[in-house]
Image (tube, helix red, strand yellow):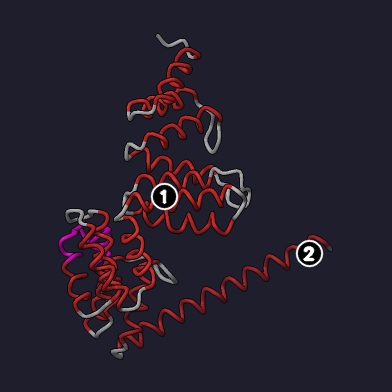
Amino acid sequence: MRKRFCFMMIVGLVLVNVALADNIANKVQETFNDCLKKDAKACYSFAFYNHIGFGIAKDYKKAAEYYQKACDMGILLGCDKIGMMYELGEGFQKDYKKAIRIYEKTCSLKDEAGCFALGRLYAEGQGVEKNISTAKKYFQKSCDYGEQDACDKVKTLDNTQNDEDFMKELEADMQKCENGNTTMCNAIVKAADLACSFQHDYACYVVGVVYSSENRDIQNYHKAKEYFQKACDMKFAPACFNLGSSYALGKGVRQNLSNAMEYFGKACDYGLQQGCNNYKMIRGKLNIR
């Protein structure tokens, strides 16, 4: 009886999945038919289905073709998607110049996504020379056109332009976080993560510190390591030191004294004496001469 019940359950699940697949396939076909009738939104949706492989085999070339149709019919996000595909090398050879030309055109038409993409590229120095002032200009345009994430980035850039005040503010908030204020911890992560995305070494370090805190509601040693690594790559000595400690103690990583010694050595090279001391200590434990 039990075997029969299990068999019927399996058959039922298979039938449900088949019906679901049929519904999705029908939806994709209907969208394609609507696109043929010059429905711009349908063309965009059909392009997106091809782009991600929803109910149809993933096909970047077809995605680009129908994003272009949507773009030509006034869907600016379709134009932006083509720019993104050039940026990522999806269906095309990676070409930042073409991506930027597309974003510049859509941004000039007051498209928040195109302006945001330009802000991101200038902030990260991808395909263009890094220029925070230009990044801020495009983020501000995106914000003015309705993109809240762009408004947040403008605010963060304003804050980080005066590093001393920004660091003092983070330090004061960190004290509240360490005292168990989880709401403050989350607020710090949100603000500092944005600054970290603009290659602010101390901000990346602070996010790592929050995730490695004793506050169980936010503690995440794996994420802490990720942010310490970002700051260490920017030659921020305390972050390298904390990575060394993570490897020495096995927090968020498998314990590895050789790696610990490497990161303590980097902390030492970047000017932190405690890194030098720990480097020597582990070197002695490993009997390295």
Quadrant of the image for the C terminus?
top left
User: As rendered, which of 8 and 213 lies closer to the eye?
Assistant: 213
Q: Secondary structure at mark 1?
A: helix
Find disc 1 in the rendering and name its residue: 168
Q: Residue at x 19, y 56 (%)?
A: 127
Residue 207, can we see it? yes
Residue at x-position 35% and y-position 64%: 155
In magenta stretch: residue 15 = no
**Quick one: SS at disc 2?**
helix
Query: In terms of depth relative to the viewer, which is nearer, 126 or 98?
Result: 126
| Amino acid identity at mark 1 | Lys
Q: Which mark is residue 4?
A: 2
Part of the protein shown in magenta: 83-100
State left or right for residue 3 relative to residue 234.
right
Query: What percent of the width, then of the height, locates residue 276?
Result: 40, 21
> Circle 2: is it few (<14), some (14-19), or many (20+) Cα within 10 Å?
few
Relative to 165, residue 272 above or below: above
Kindly report the distance in space between the C-alpha atoms of the residues bearing marks 2 and 1: 68 Å
Q: Where residue 18 sits: x, y (%)?
A: 56, 72
User: Residue shown at 40%/47% (left/top)?
Assistant: 204
Q: Residue furthest bottom?
A: 37
Does 93 lie within the magenta span? Answer: yes
> Which part of the image, by quadrant, shows the N terminus?
bottom right
